[in-house]
Image (cartoon, helix red, strand yellow):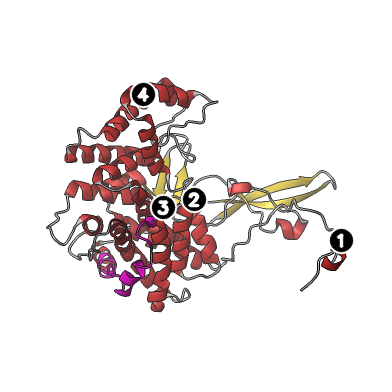
Amino acid sequence: MNNTTKKEVKKAILSFPDTGESYEMPVLEGSVGPKAIDVRRLYTDTGYFTYDPGFTSTASCESGLTYIDGEAGILSHRGYKIEDLAAGSTYLEVCYLLLYGELPDKKRFEEFVHHVTYHSLVHEQIHYFFRGFRRDAHPMSVMVGAVGALSAFYHDSLDIDDLEQRELAAYRLLAKMPTLAAMAYKYSIGQPFTYPRNELSYAENFLHMTFSVPSETYDVNPVLARAMDKILILHADHEQNASTSTVRLAGSSRANPFACIASGIASLWGPAHGGANEAVLDMLTEIGSPNRIPEFIERAKNKDDPFRLMGFGHRVYKNYDPRAQVMREACHEVLSELGIENEPLLDLAMQLEKIALEDEYFVERKLFPNVDFYSGIILKAMGFPTSMFTVLFALSRSVGWIAQWKEMIEEPTQKIGRPRQLYTGPAPRHYVPMTERGIEIP
């Protein structure tokens, strides 16, 4: 449940010009952010309902997890700014915060880390399950199938009415997502799966499972591990986006948690949602060389040209993406640590960043590099193929999906999601039987 209860502050009046009647609706106020007009009884009382394609002006739920102020460039989890969490916390502490609402003390945090760490192994038969996929299957298709299939292996955490089973499902999903993501990568390149190691941190363990091979010793670079942990923190949750809304909608039918998270992965796979950092790399490939940057900058300014600079600006943030500065610092740390000097694509990205940050057109319109611009560069520098970028997004966002699902399940007024529609098809018409239209019925 939320720490702050919504309150009614006044009434909104809706007038119907055809009848001259009016209807009063409660106006609700949360702890911060815009007020909301409560239209829940609108159809019942008046016969009208609202029309809002994309739900851009509709609050579908009450939530105490994440707050975004796009105009001010603010993102916070449970009241804590994302910049502070990225600077002083770890991904698993952010997970605890999102799941339980408060920062943990030493004892609670150690217990939480222990639970997550010791659930990182997957059932051995899941190894055979992977063999059913084609070798060239996209890793996201593998993740959708593998996460959904967890419900077939862990029957003792499917009862959503049992608090202990909900907790167990949350631990399992958090712990096994890195394992499954690494397995999806290993399977795609024909390498053997690497088992998790409990002495490593969450980010270190994922990097080890992804890049180590049995024939060699692999030492996790601490700079890369810190950068990976920041990537996970910065993508942990982002309010009611498409994939989170999908998880909530699936969960409203009382589907099991593994199926709900699989539905979120499927939604995230869409290029309009989770593919932005991959699109950045595609754009850099299209630009090709630094001497072509001015040409593409001018194309981006031309309203009649379909080309857009990917990784600049944000649909929600009308100011600087608060995650971008953290990611920018991590990006430069990674490139410096790896000593990357002759990688054309990464060099191109840094030059494009410099020009765009200084260009008056982009500065005036606040089209700053966003988190996707830098995360794509970091992941490429680390050695991840672009096909894995969205998988890593899913890994990061898994805790947000789980926390949103738990919050919804524990809301006593929760109902199954059932959006309305504005029907525009044919009006009622007379049916002519098949035989009267010369069609024989077998």
Question: Which of the two labelled residues, at mark 3 and mark 4, occupies the earlier sequence position?
Answer: 3
The magenta-colored residue range is 113-139
Residue for badge 1: 430
Residue for badge 3: 237
Q: Does residue 63 appear in the picture of this structure?
A: no
Q: Is residue 147 above or below residue 292?
A: below
Residue 123 on the magenta segment? yes
Please give left or right for residue 218 compared with residue 90 in the image: left
Q: For the residues labelled 4 and 1, say whether their Cβ atoms are less than 8 Å apart.
A: no
The amino acid type, in three-letter code, at marker 2 is Asn
State the quadrant of the C terminus.
bottom right
Q: Position of residue 255 (x, y in %)?
A: 51, 70
Residue at horizontal 81 percent and vertical 69 percent from the top: 440
Residue at horizontal 48 percent and vertical 41 percent from the top: 316
Q: CA distance from mark 3 to mark 2?
A: 9 Å
Tag of residue 241: 2
Please give left or right for residue 183 compared with residue 41 in the image: left
Q: Quadrant of residue 394?
A: bottom left
Q: Position of residue 294 (x, y in %)?
A: 38, 21
Q: Position of residue 94 (x, y in %)?
A: 33, 55
Residue for badge 4: 292
